[in-house]
Amino acid sequence: MKVTRTRALRGPNLWSRHTAIEAVVACEGDENAIGRLAGFEDRLRAAFPTIGELHPMVLGQPLALAHVLENAAVALQAQAGCAVNFGHTSPTLEEGVYQVVVQYTEEAVGRRALELAEALIAAAQNGTAFDATAAITELRDLDESERLGPSTGSIVDAAVARGIPYRRLTSGSLVQFGWGSKQRRIQAAEVDSTSGVAESIAQDKELTKQLLNAAGVPVPLGRPVTDMDDAWAAAQEIGLPVVVKPQDGNQGKGVTVNITTREQLDAAYTAADAHGEVMVEKFLPGFDFRLLVVGDRLVAASRRDPPHVIGDGSATVRQLVDTVNLDPRRGEGHATSLTKIRLDDIAVGRLEAQGLTPDSVPALGQRVVLRNNANLSTGGTATDVTDTVHPEVAARAVDAAQMVGLHICGVDVVCESVLRPLEEQHGGIVEVNAAPGLRMHISPSFGRGRAVGEAVVDALFAHGDDGRIPVIAVTGTNGKTTTTRLINHIVASSGLRTGMTNTDGVYVDGRQTDSGDCSGPKSARNVLLHPDVDAAVFEVARGGVLREGLGFDRCSVAVVTNIGSGDHLGLNYITTVEDLAVLKRVVVRNVAPGGYAVLNAADPNVAAMATNCPGEVIFFAADRQHPVMATHRAQGKRTVYVDQDTVVAAEGSWRERISLRDVPITRGGSIGFQVDNVMAAVAAAWAVGLDWDTIRSGLASFLNDAAGVPGRFNVMDYRGATVIADYGHNTDAMRALVSAVDTMPAKKRSVVISGAGDRRDSDIRDQTAILGQAFDDVILYQDAAQRGRADGEVMGLLRQGLQGATRTRQIDEIRGEFIAIDAALARLQPGDLSLILVDQVDEALAHLAKRIAEG
C-alpha cells in the first residue's frame, strides 16, 4: 500500500461538511482484499486492539488496506480525545487506487493520524511492533498543543452554537467571529473593543488602585517600592501583614501574601523583583474570590483556594502531592480544568514557614498549604459561588471593570464572604485582570460550571445577529464569471460595499486587491476577513473545491449556471458530467437553511440539485413551460423566465417584469447565453432581498466591455468590422458563442482559436468541429502554455476537428497569440466579423485595444 498524495479539505467538500484529510492510496494485488493476506487482521488487532469494526464503503465489497487506513486513522484520533467520527473510502476508476477521507478537528493531528495509521498497517503486514499507546499519547499531546485553550474554546463553542462563523487568525488564541463588516475579534478572553490603554491600566496595579479608590471602590492601601529597605518601610507604614507583588503581573507570578516578618518580606521582594517593579500593599484577611464581569454584568464568581494537601498520618508531603496530581482533571498548563501542584522552590519555602519539608509526614487531617496565592495556574482549586454574590459586591466588581475600561474583566476580591457588602467586612478589590482565565468558571473544582462563553458572545453580537453578511456563490461550467460580475454590480448598486472573487481577481468595494485566477477558497476567505465588505459574491471553480473545499461554511445563495462536458473532465477522478454535477452540488448542499439555490431548470443535472438544497429553490429558464418550471410555478414557488423580450420573476400570482431592451449585455435579448446569465443574476438579487428598482438600474448600467467583464463576449468595432473577444474554452461555450454570433449580421466570419492542453483529445477536437460549421476562416494559434502537451500536438488536434467542416474555406496555423490576432485584424473588411478566443485575457485585450486605437 502506498499513499501517493494527501491534502487538507478545510471547508465543506465533495465528501462531507467536515474538515478532512483526503489521501490517494494505491493498493496492489491482495492488498485489495485483505482476506487473502494471511494473518493480517489478527496481527492488526493485536497491535491495535481498539481499532473497532472494519468495514468497506459498500457491504459485500472486499475490504482493502485503504479501508483499514481510514478506520485506523479515525480510531486513533477518537481515542486521543478528538471529536471525529467520519471516514470514507471510495475506489477510483484506476485499478487498486482509492480516495480515503478522514475527518479531523486539528489539521496537524489529522495528518499525523494518517501517518501513524499507515505505520500500523505496515507493522501488521510485516509482523513488526507498533506501540498503539504511544501513538495515541502522541496524538493527544499534539491535539492539546494545537487546539484552542479552554477560555478561548468556550467562547468559540458558544459562537458555533449560535451559528456564528469563526476563523483562527493565528496558531494562538486570536480568533475572528463573523464576516466582513460584521466581524468581531477576540484574543483569548479579550475583545477587540477593549483599548490598549485599558489593558495598560490593568497591568499597572498602583494606577488601578488609584482609579478604583477615586470611584469609591474599596481597595487595600499600598505603594510601589524601590528596594528591600523601602519595601520594609512601606510595610511598616501600612501595617503588617502585607502582600508583595509585581506592579505589572499576571497569573499570580511573583506574588507573596500574609507577610509578617522582615525575612519573609526580603524573600518575597526577590520573587516579585524578577517580574518587574515591586509594590507592597495591605494584606486583607479572608478568602480569595474571582468575579468575572462581562460588559455591564457579573456572570460568574469563584472562591479560589491555594494548592494544598491534607495529611493522612502516614504519607509524606511529596507523596500526598503525587496522589493529588493523579486526578485526571489536573494537567500541565491551561488545557485542563486543574493544574498539577508543583513542589518547586516557592512551595518548599511555604512548607518551611509551616515547619515542614517535602519529606515531612503531616498529621491526620492537617492542612498543608503549598503556595500563598490561589491561582489555578499554580495548582489552586476553584469553588463556584456565583449564586451567593451580594448585589453590592457584584456592583463594585462592575464599577471596577468599567473604571479601568475592560469589557471582560477578572476582578480579584479578598473578603470573608461574598454574602455581604465589602465595606461591612473590610474587604477589598486587590486586582483587576484583562484577558482573565475562564476555566475556573467553565469547569470549577467544585460546584456548577457557568456559561461564560455564551456571555462573551452575547456581548459581542446582539440577539439574533449571527455575524454573517450575504454570501452569493456562483458555480457551473459556463457563464460563472459574467454572472458573478453582474450580481456583484447589482448588489453594489444597492449601496452595499461588495467583495468579489472570480477568475480575473479579487475586488473589494470596486477596487482590485488581487489578480489572476482567484476563484478558489483562499481568495474567498480573504474577502470575508475584510472589514469593508457588506456582501460577498464568489465565483466557485471546481479546482478549489477539489483541492481544499469551500472557503465558507454556508452561503445565502448558491447559483448553478449549467453543467457541461468540457470542463476539465478526466482530471482528479472527475470523469463524467455526472461526477462534475456531484462536485458542483457541494455549493447547493451548503446553502443556509433560510437561503436559496438558483438553478438552471433547463439543465437536468442542475435541476436535480434542488433536492439537496437545505433552503428554498428559484428555478430559471427561458421557457416557462419547461416541465420543471411549470411544476415549480404551480406550487407557488419562485421562478424566473423569458416572455418575448422580457425577463419575468414570478411567485404565485405575483409578477415582476424587466425589459431586455434595457439590459445592454443581452443586445436586446438576442444573445441567448447572456439572457441566461441575466436570469440567474436577477434570481440571486431577488433571493437576497434587493428591491426591483435597484435590480433594474443595475442591469441597465452593466456594460459588457473589456473593463466590466474582460474576455466575456466583448464587442468592439475595428474599421467598420465587428470584433468579439471571448475566453470561451470548452464545447458548450463554443455552441453558445456560435448561437450568439449567428444573430449578428456579417459579410464574412472568421475565428481565432487555440486549445488548452489539459483537456481531453476529444474535447479539443470538438471545439473546432463546432466552429468549422459557422466560420469561413479559422486561424489556429499555439498558446503560451501547452500544459504537458508536446510541441504542435494541440494544433494537430484542432486541425483534426476541422476535417469535416462544411463552411470553413481557409485554415491557417500561427505561432503566438498576438501574431494571430494581428493576422485576423489585417484581413477584416467593413461588415466582417471576427471572433477571437483569447488565452492571455488581460494581455490580449490590451493588445486589441491598442490596435483599435491605432485604427
Image (cartoon, grey):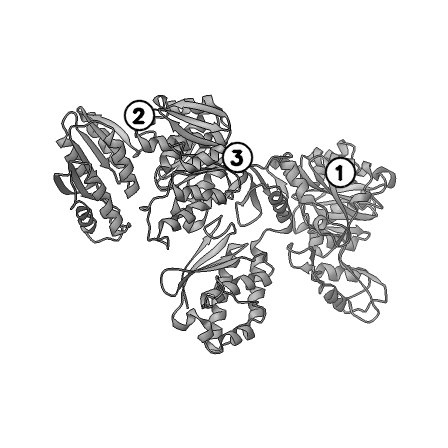
Is there CB contact under 8 Å for labels 2 and 1? no
Instruction: Look at discs 2 and 1 and give the one toward the viewer.
Output: 2
Query: Which element type, helix, strand or loop, lies under badge 3?
Result: loop
Q: Mark 3 points at which residue?
A: 469
* Residue closest to the eye, 110 or 13: 13
> Viewer-proximal residue, 258 or 584?
584
Q: Mark 2 points at which residue?
A: 667
Do callouts 2 and 3 mark residues in contact (Cβ within 8 Å)?
no
Question: From mark 2 to mark 1, how far is it between C-alphas?
Answer: 69 Å
> Can you tell which mark lies on residue 397?
1
Foreground residue, 814 or 527?
A: 814
Identified at 13% across, 31% down, the residue is 826
* Residue 698 x/y as whole percent: 41, 24
Q: Tag 2: Cα neighbours inside 10 Å, few (<14), some, or many (≥20)?
A: some
Earlier in the chain: of badge 2 and badge 1, it is 1
Q: Which numbered circle lies on residue 722?
A: none
Q: Tell me, yes or no, if residue 763 can be seen here.
A: yes
Mark 3 or mark 2, which is nearer the start of the sequence? 3
Q: Position of residue 811 (x, y in %)?
A: 13, 41
Q: Name the image quarter holding the N terminus.
A: bottom left
> Which one is earlier in the sequence, the residue at label 1 or at label 3?
1
Count of labels shown? 3
Q: What kind of residue is marked 1?
A: Ala
* In front of the other: 24 or 383: 24
Query: Which-is-in-front pick, marks 2 and 3?
Result: 2
Q: Which residue lies furthest to the right in this view?
A: 424
Circle 1 — which element? Answer: helix
